[in-house]
Amino acid sequence: MQYLGRASSLPFRWQFTRNLLLVATATVALTSRSAFATNTSSPSATSFGIKNPSSKMADETYTPGTSSVAFVTTPDKESAKKLAHGIIERKLAACVNIMPQIESIYMWEGKVNEDNEYLMMIKTRSTRIDELSKFVRENHPYSVAEVISLPIQAGNLPYLNWITQTVPEKAESKD
């Protein structure tokens, strides 16, 4: 019986130990972050988007929403690859990922449809979404092509900078 008495207190002991570990982890995290804030010359600080005033790089921070991810579905792999190549060649995006065999269930012309499609995940500048949409509309096999975009709020700073460097600003119209 004495063993059972100890076993009944085991969950409390586990909870207590877990809570101690959580407090220790939070303390380490806070200490590490304050070290990043005071030592901005470390490479780790720039990866968190902390600006280093002595750095020669002008763009060490990311403005949320500057880049976007656009989603486009296609009926087959060939259509997705053709669109992706055209998008990249025209510098409308830095990268296109093609995800195979997604299942889409949607309402079209009054009835529920179910199809296998390919999903394109396109990383670009937010200012280029209209041009990207136009290109997709003009080259997509569907009469109504899906092009939806979401702004990128945060991420790996070197990757976000790569998107910005790869995709030029929207061309100004010369009237």
Image (cartoon, helix red, strand yellow):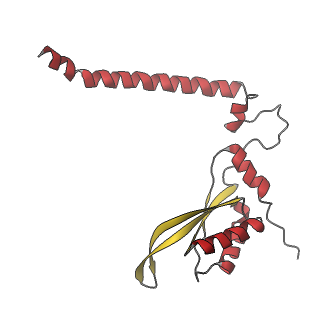
Residue extending farthest top: 2
Residue 73: quarter of image: bottom right
Residue 62 visible somewhere in the drawing: no
As drawn, the residue found furthest toward the bottom would be 109
* Image quadrant containing the N terminus: top left
Residue 135 visible somewhere in the drawing? yes
Q: Nearer the viewer, residue 144 or 7?
A: 7
**Horizontal and vertical percent for residue 85?**
71, 68
Q: Residue at x 74, y 49 (%)?
A: 161
| The residue positioned farthest toward the front in the image shown | 78
**Residue lying at the far right of the rendered structure:** 174
Q: Is residue 151 left or right of residue 172?
A: left
Q: Name which residue lies at 68% across and 28% down.
A: 37
Q: Residue 26 appears at what percent x and percent y? A: 50, 26
Tell me how many marks there are: 0
Quarter of the picture containing the C terminus is bottom right
Residue at image coords 72%, 35% = 46
Q: Residue at x 54, y 23 (%)?
A: 28
Up/down of 72 relative to 95, above or below = below
User: Where does the image place residue 163, in percent across and percent down from the top left?
Assistant: 73, 54
Find residue 99 and report its image quarter.
Answer: bottom right
Q: Position of residue 118 (x, y in %)?
A: 55, 69
Q: Describe residue 1's horizontal placement relative to residue 116 as left or right.
A: left
